[in-house]
Amino acid sequence: MTHTPDATPAQTPSPSPSSSPSPVLVIGGTGKTGRRVVARLREMGVETRAASRSGETRFDWEDPTTWAPALEGAEAVYIVPLDTEPSPTPAFVEQAVAAGVRRLVLLSARGVDVPGYFGSPLLDEGPHLKGEEAVRSSGLAWTILRPGWFIQNFTEGVFLDAVRDGELALPVGDGQAAYIDTDDIAAVAVAALTEDGHDGEVYELSGPRALGIADVLDEIAKARGGAPAVYVAAEETAFRDELIAQGMAEVEAKLWTAALDPIRTSREAPLKDGVRRALGRPPRDVADVFRDAAAEGAWG
């Protein structure tokens, strides 16, 4: 399910603490999107449980005995799923229903419903899609978020060290992606957790423009000052072999390489309207995100 770019933004009331009288449980509460969701909810005065293996509320996807204590009394849940097979999300959703949860907001991924989107049949109908099926059939109010590649991969994620070191090698050629700000993802998640008007929605989330990797590195250079890091268009086999040489398991190296295919093929380039539909405003641009990141010393 996708939405046309000229769809009318959802008209929703302003959130208030009273809209969520019971705690909101945030799975992955210390992660890229989760910690931002926690911060926004608490700024609004919403009682919030930040749940993770190292969070205030202990939660471990691989230890189901931690699920029920985290769920107890929760009104709504933001689910950052474990991206493994078999997916534990369906079993967790069953426990959420039994615990009396009323609303689920699931972090999924762009392209999960498109066969071959990720460049490997091993990633088709994977854990994200199974998670979506579970929340849809739960009988609870639900909202699904489908973001593309995060802008923050360049400021605090997998590409950060390479950018700092001055050379980023990826097997994506001249492909483009409309990178999404994780703060925008969090804002949409919080709206769905605390407001009416988002039930049954699938929000496809992208940034406002598509960029190649070299363009992204140029934007970082503008934000921080100085010359940009060099982009090296690596060959897929060589890239995969290098990951294995660095200690990554062969199957993981293959999957990681395949996961980059939506950038290489520019499947991530089309702009999506989920942020505007959910929030009534455009998504933030990479230039704005990088300017803030530079001020915070992201690249040293």
Image: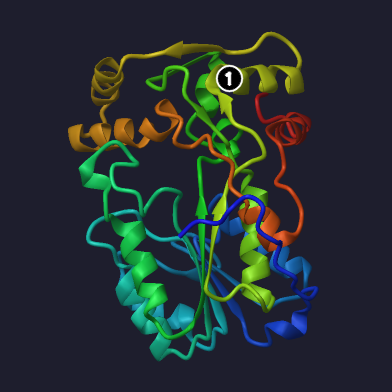
- Residue shown at 59% from the left, 13% from the top: 229
From what the image shows, is residue 54 above or below residue 163? Answer: below
Q: Position of residue 52 (x, y in %)?
A: 47, 63
Rendering quarter of residue 163: top right
Q: Is residue 132 left or right of residue 84?
A: right
Vertical comparison of 148 with 238: above or below? below
Amino acid type, callout 1: Arg
Image coordinates for residue 138, horizontal then vertical, percent: 39, 82
**Residue 105: percent from left, percent from top:** 52, 69
Q: Horizontal and vertical percent for residue 252?
A: 25, 37
Residue shown at 47% from the left, 33% from the top: 158
In which quadrant of the rendered view does residue 187 lie?
bottom right
Which residue is nearer to you in this view: 130 or 252? 130
Q: Nearer the viewer, residue 114 or 156?
A: 114
Q: Residues within 10 Å of mark 1 (few under 14, many from 20)?
A: some
For the question of whether residue 237 can be seen, the reply is yes
Q: Which residue is mark 1?
A: 164
Residue at 70% from the left image edge and 61% from the top image edge: 8
Above or below, 154 against 205 in this view is above
Q: Is residue 165 above or below residue 144?
A: above
Q: Which residue is located at x 76 percent, y 85 percent?
A: 18
Which of the image's four quarters has the C terminus? top right
* SS label for mark 1: helix
Q: Is residue 98 left or right of residue 104?
A: left
Q: How many marks?
A: 1
